[in-house]
Image: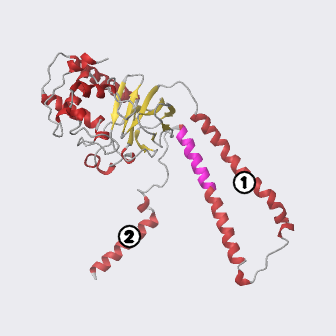
Amino acid sequence: MFSIKKSLTGVTGFLLSLLTGTAFADYKLNFPEPVSPLTQQMYDLHMMTTTMATGIMIVVIAVVTYSIVKFRKSKDYQADQNFHKGTFGTWSWLLVPIIVLGIDLSIAEPALDALKKVEEQKPADITVKVIGSQWKWTYEYIDDDIRIVSNMLSKEEAGDNYLRAVDNPLVLPVNKRIRFLHTASDVLHAWWVPAIVYKKDSIPGYINETWTLIEKEGTYRGQCAENCGTGHAFMPIVVEAVSQEKYDAWVTAQKTAKAAALAEASANKTWGKDELMARGKAIYDINCAGCHQTTGEGIPGVFPALKGSAIATGPVAAHLDIVMNGKAGTAMSAWTNQFNDLELAAVVTYERNAWGNDTGDLVQPASVKAVRK
């Protein structure tokens, strides 16, 4: 009896919460709240067309329902053979197209204005090149020579934001015009954060352009909006919009870290195996594991395995060459301009000694420097 009473109390509470709307507080079926002028305009256009479509649907369903009930066969209703001669029958052929045209024109004007702004090309305060690849995003701040790679966090690291959290978010200042240059290194992707920017495809060998002006600080999330392959669901996007002061401090920290890394890479030091393996694993997990997998086993038929492969266990020079210069006709990118000498040496060393490859080969930064073109 107690359990039944408790269950009824729970059901009653749930129904009351539905009536008060509290049960829906965490469920939003609409787009995220826009925080840039252009996405706000698109959001308003979306709401207007949705409202119109809902109104038309209600009217049409009401007329159809009324007609079915009023003129049903069981009432022995006889069809009006002179309907077209009446006032409504005569003028409806004129009025209905006028109403439809009026609706279309009311949508066309704001839609045309939004499209003009999409293609608007004004000088930008910051330009970010966004590169989509399987299965990560690479951001290059053109003006500041900063490059970061953004990978999805694991379920243990992300918690409730699994599939919505990354290790390196894109950091941008508010109230600045940001230009995005979109491209891809393998297949079609689409970088889309609906709160701040509209969608355009990222196409290999081609540059698409979008822009935004974020008016509110915060964390904004998105996802690849192109069905790019088996890892499509694992390409989340996170944008951190911050004040200009915080952005300047972030840029300074990035440049300082990059300068320190270059100084370390160019130092005349012979690195030990443990040091190279630790650094190589970190670089591999961020940049290479998306294709070749953390196990080094690749994806059969899609990405080759490194575990026990001819490349990772064969001549060091050939291995270093393909990492530095890529392989034409495949998804293997050239990393020579993206990694410094130490990073290249470390990742090649790691690949040659991980997963049971155990070649014992150590590649030093000096060796990379000697072959760098």
Q: Which amino acid is tagged 1?
A: Val
Q: Which amino acid is tagged 2?
A: Gly
The front one of 355 and 37 is 355
| Residue 324 rendering spot, x and y as whole percentages | 30, 25
* Residue at 25%, 17% in the rendered image: 369
Q: Residue furthest right?
A: 85
Region of the chain picked out in magenta, as a range: 38-52
- Asked if residue 90 is positioned above or below residue 175 in the image, the reply reads below
User: Where, quadrant-wise, is the N terminus in this rendering?
Assistant: bottom left
- Please state if 258 lies on the left or on the right of 175 as rendered: left
- Asked if residue 335 is positioned above or below residue 114 in the image, the reply reads above
| N-terminal-most mark, 1 or 2 | 2
* Residue 39 lies in the magenta-colored region: yes
- Please state if 31 lies on the left or on the right of 264 as rendered: right
Q: Quadrant of residue 42?
A: top right
The front one of 185 and 6 is 185
Residue picked out by circle 1: 100
Name the secondary structure under disc 1.
helix
- Please state if 126 lies on the left or on the right of 347 as rendered: right
The front one of 316 and 333 is 316
Marks 1 and 2, how far apart at CA: 46 Å
* Residue 283 lies in the magenta-colored region: no
| Residue 143 rendering spot, x and y as whole percentages | 42, 22
Residue picked out by circle 2: 13
Q: Name the front one of labels 1 and 2.
A: 1
User: Where, quadrant-wise, is the C terminus in this rendering?
Assistant: top left
The chief SS type of the magenta part is helix
| Residue 12 rendering spot, x and y as whole percentages | 39, 73
